[in-house]
Amino acid sequence: MGHRLSQIVTRTGDQGQTSLGSGTRVDKDSLPIQTLGVIDELNSWIGVVVALSASQPVKDTLTFVQHDLFDLGAQISVPGTPLLSHAHLSRLDSSFENLNSGLGMLKEFILPGGTPSAAFTHVARTVCRRAERQLFSLIETEAANMGNVKTFSTKENFGLSYLNRLSDLLFVASRVENREGGHVDVLWQRGKSLGSGGAI
């Protein structure tokens, strides 16, 4: 790894192309690169949450997630490297149950926000949903290109399932952050901006 990162500035991408981990040159707006970019964005927002979190269980859980997201990126970048597994999904499910166990039942949607760490966790949650959509587009496009070597296929990975469950985990983590920060979740009130129903 040290050898791979020994030269950060390469100038090989000055003309709008870059290399996947397999060495394949692709345009920077190609679906694999766009998908990797959203996953990188998600990982960065999760890093903000870890830095601000008031909950050690949230910090520990999301640090593991950051490593998993690098595994997912490697899986997209290098064909034939199915790094995510049932074990990763099981760990997410277990983390979800542990974090959610101390929270009250919700009868309504909640507004994104609260403490800074909770608000950033909501941002991470929405980026996670975008990453899921982007990954689905990548898989669908590759499924349509039957003559091409696939970078990513549903039979080789658990990426879609992982991102789907991660977004739920991030929602629960946002509630934990508000609880730890002494901030009550703000429930959505239908038509609240209109008061008792009068026009603005």
Image (cartoon, rainbow, N blue to C red):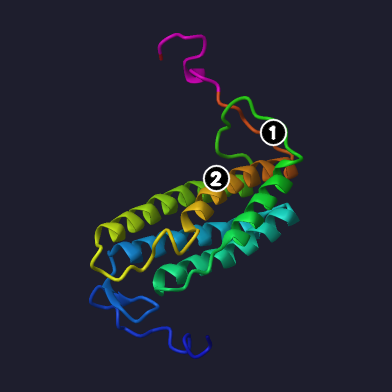
Q: Where's residue 123, x and y in %?
A: 51, 48
The secondary element bearing badge 1 is classed as loop
Residue at 41% x, 75% y is 78
Q: Is residue 65 left or right of residue 82?
A: right
Which residues fall within the magenta stretch?
Answer: 189-199
Q: Where's residue 73, x and y in %?
A: 46, 68
Relative depth, front residue between 50 and 2 = 2
Q: Which mark is residue 122?
A: 2
Residue at 23% x, 67% y is 147
In the image, residue 96 lies in the stretch drawn in magenta: no
Distance in Å between CA atoms under marks 1 and 2: 15 Å
The secondary element bearing badge 2 is classed as helix
Q: Nearer the viewer, mark 1 or mark 2?
A: 2
Q: Is residue 191 left or right of residue 79?
A: right
Which quadrant of the structure image shows residue 152? bottom left
In the image, residue 194 lies in the stretch drawn in magenta: yes
The answer to whether one can see residue 115 in this image is no
Query: Which secondary structure class fits the magenta region best?
Result: loop
Disc 1 residue type (three-letter): Val
Residue at 59% x, 59% y is 86
Which quadrant of the structure image shows residue 182? top right
Q: Where's residue 143, x and y in %?
A: 30, 58
Q: 10 Å neighbourhood of mark 2: few (<14), some, or many (≥20)? A: many
* Pointers 1 and 2 in contact (C-beta within 8 Å): no
Disc 2 residue type (three-letter): His
The residue that label 1 is drawn on is 184
Relative depth, front residue between 61 and 197 = 61
